Image (cartoon, rainbow, N blue to C red):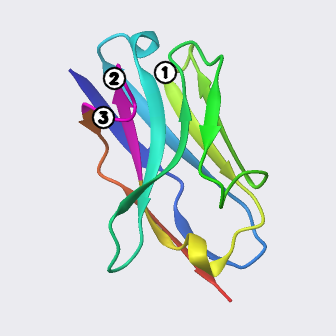
Amino acid sequence: QVQLVESGGGLVQAGASLRLSCAASGDTFANYAMGWFRQAPGQGREFVAAITSRGGNLRYTPSVKGRFTISRDMAMNTLYLQMNSLKPDDTADYYCAAGIDISNPEYWGQGTRVTVSS
């Protein structure tokens, strides 16, 4: 079992930056690939970014590539999402996820809300 707790969301203006954090506890953090997903109001949940279990490979959805950076701190059991040049279209609830295969996550956090005003 893995427990995931996100933090760092908030209300910002377009062009601002935010850093989301996801603290993991329970099973060994290094066993799992990690990812960020988001769900905008009235929309389905979509993939944002992923990082492999040891951090060697990163993947992003095209709309955030070059603006968002996913990383993980193995010592702190924490996943991050640095979000720069935020746009109103980035407004969503952001969820941290963990899994052996991040395309089918086994564990989810409760979400943190990001609102970007124009």
Name which of mark 2 and mark 3 comes first in the sequence: 2
- The quarter of the image holding the N terminus is top left
Q: Amino acid at mark 1?
A: Asn
Circle 1 crowding by C-alpha within 10 Å: few under 14, some 14–19, many from 20:
some
> Can you say whether 91 is above or below 32 in the image?
below
| Mark 2 lies on residue | 25
The span picked out in magenta is: 95-106
Give the SS element for disc 1.
Answer: loop
- Examine the structure image and report whether residue 87 is included in the region drawn in magenta: no
Drawn side of residue 106 relative to residue 43, left or right: left
> Can you say whether 69 is above or below 8 in the image?
above
Q: Position of residue 55 (x, y in %)?
A: 61, 19
Q: Are marks 1 and 2 in contact (CB under 8 Å)?
A: yes
| Quarter residue 105 falls in | top left
| Quarter residue 118 falls in | bottom right
Mark 1 or mark 3, whichever is nearer to me = 3
Give the SS element for disc 3.
Answer: loop
**Alpha carbon distance from label 2 to label 3:** 19 Å
Please tell me the numbered disc located at residue 104: 3
The residue nearer to you, when weighing 66 against 62, is 62
- The residue at 31%/44% (across/down) is 109
Please tell me the numbered disc located at residue 77: 1
Please tell me the numbered disc located at residue 64: none
